Each structure stands twice: as structure tokens, then as C-alpha cells.
Image: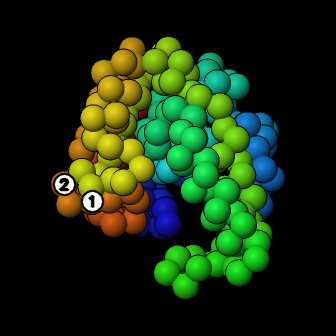
């Protein structure tokens, strides 16, 4: 999903890493611990949806290493009861019937189910976002059905150095739906470190 952005960042001389999150177990905090062991030195964490949850876990575990953070369609709060129930249903469906036909993915049903468990069980990270000392970009599509624009705005406004970017005519996965536009947003955000 990050291929266009990785190519763009490499073209301007940056060294992006796009780790695979699936297959890392049923804990986003565990994913973060693994990534911190794999990546050396300080970095800017950029994550879409569950990748944003992972970026928040990285900042919680090692704030001194996370110079900046971009959360794309990633709520900072824990799942609501309604969202947890949705995830429970999806986990059961994945384990009994496999990947739904309308879900375009190459990820297997069990890896998807385990990732849903990790997202379901993640802690509230509102405090992490609010107290994060680096630059925080909150990017959301204006038609995102997971992170409403007003909630994204509240996260950006509540952060020490937060900014909001709303992408018109985009839903939850801005990085996939509008890769060129998101690439420009990302380059602008990263320019403060280049």
C-alpha cells in the first residue's frame, strides 16, 4: 500500500522503511517493540489506520526516538463498544468463512483476524497524541467512516505541535485512494527534517 510513497521519498533522497505489520502477533505494543528493535536511531513514524495505532505505540514506548508522527485515518482513542462488537463479528467471520469477497487484500484470514484482535485490544492513546513533543500531522479523508473530520481536528488541536490536513473526496485509506495528493502532503510534512 505504500509503494507510491516509498518511491517518492526515495526519489528525494530519503530512506523510507515500510515494514509489514501483519504476522507480528496480537499486540500493537508488541509490534512497536519489534519495530524499535529493527530500526536504528530517531525516525518519523507515518501510519495509516492500524499503522497509526502502531506509530502511537512507538511514541509511547520510545518518545525520544520518534521525531515526528503522521497519523492517517487513525483514531487515537480506544475502540468504542460498537467498534469492538464490529471487530468481534469480523474476527469470527474471518475464522469461519475466510476473507470476505468484498475485501481486496492479499493478507490471509488468520493474519487479518489477529490484527483485528490487536486493534480491538489497543489502549487509548489520546494522552500520547496530546503530549507528543514532536510535530504531529493528522491526515483524514473528508468521507472517512472510521475517523470523522471533527474528531481528527480535535486530536490535532489538542496536540502540542499538531496540524490537520483534510483530503477532499477521500475515505478511510487516503494513502491508497489519493496516493499522489497524500505524497505531496507527506513531502511537505517531512520537509521540516530535510
Please provide percent x and percent y for residue 37: 79, 39
Badge 2 marks a residue whose secondary structure is loop
Question: Residue at horizontal 62%, vertical 19%?
Answer: 64
Please provide percent x and percent y for residue 155: 38, 27
Q: Is residue 175 left or right of residue 39?
A: left
Q: Is residue 3 left or right of residue 78?
A: left
- Whether 51 is drawn above or below 169: the answer is above
Q: Tell whether label 1 touches label 2 (CB within 8 Å).
A: yes
Figure coloring: rainbow
The image's mark for residue 168 is: 2
Question: Residue at horizontal 50%, vertical 33%?
Answer: 76
Count of all numbered marks drawn on residues in the image: 2
Please provide percent x and percent y for residue 57: 64, 33
Q: Give neighbour class at mark 1: few <14, some 14-19, many 20+ (Cα, 10 Å).
A: some
Front-most of residues 88 and 191: 88
Q: Give neighbour class at mark 2: few <14, some 14-19, many 20+ (Cα, 10 Å).
A: few
Label 2, label 1: how many angstroms apart (C-alpha)?
A: 6 Å
Badge 1 marks a residue whose secondary structure is loop
- Whether residue 183 is visible, yes or no, is no
Q: Quadrant of the C terminus?
A: top left
Residue that badge 1 annotates: 170
- Whether 70 is drawn above or below 48: the answer is above
Amino acid at each position: 500500500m505504500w509503494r507510491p510513497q516509498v518511491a517518492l521519498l526515495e526519489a528525494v533522497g530519503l530512506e523510507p522503511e515500510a515494514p509489514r505489520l501483519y504476522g507480528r502477533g496480537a499486540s500493537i505494543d508488541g509490534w512497536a517493540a519489534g519495530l524499535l528493535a529493527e530500526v536504528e536511531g530517531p525516525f518519523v513514524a507515518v501510519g495509516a489506520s492500524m499503522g497509526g495505532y502502531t506509530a502511537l505505540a512507538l511514541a509511547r514506548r520510545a518518545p525520544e526516538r520518534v521525531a515526528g508522527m503522521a497519523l492517517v485515518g487513525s483514531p487515537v482513542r480506544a475502540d468504542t463498544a460498537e467498534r469492538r462488537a464490529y471487530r468481534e463479528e469480523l474476527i469470527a467471520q474471518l475464522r469461519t468463512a475466510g476473507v470476505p469477497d468484498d475485501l481486496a487484500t492479499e493478507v490471509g484470514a488468520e493474519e487479518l483476524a489477529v490484527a483485528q484482535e490487536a486493534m480491538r485490544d489497543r489502549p487509548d492513546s489520546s494522552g500520547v497524541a496530546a503530549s507528543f513533543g514532536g510535530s504531529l500531522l493528522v491526515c483524514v479523508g473528508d468521507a472517512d467512516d472510521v475517523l470523522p473530520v471533527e474528531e481528527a481536528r480535535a486530536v490535532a488541536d489538542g496536540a502540542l505541535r499538531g496540524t490537520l490536513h483534510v483530503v477532499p473526496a477521500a475515505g478511510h485509506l487516503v494513502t491508497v485512494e489519493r496516493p499522489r495528493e497524500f505524497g505531496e502532503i507527506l513531502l511537505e510534512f517531512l520537509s521540516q527534517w530535510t
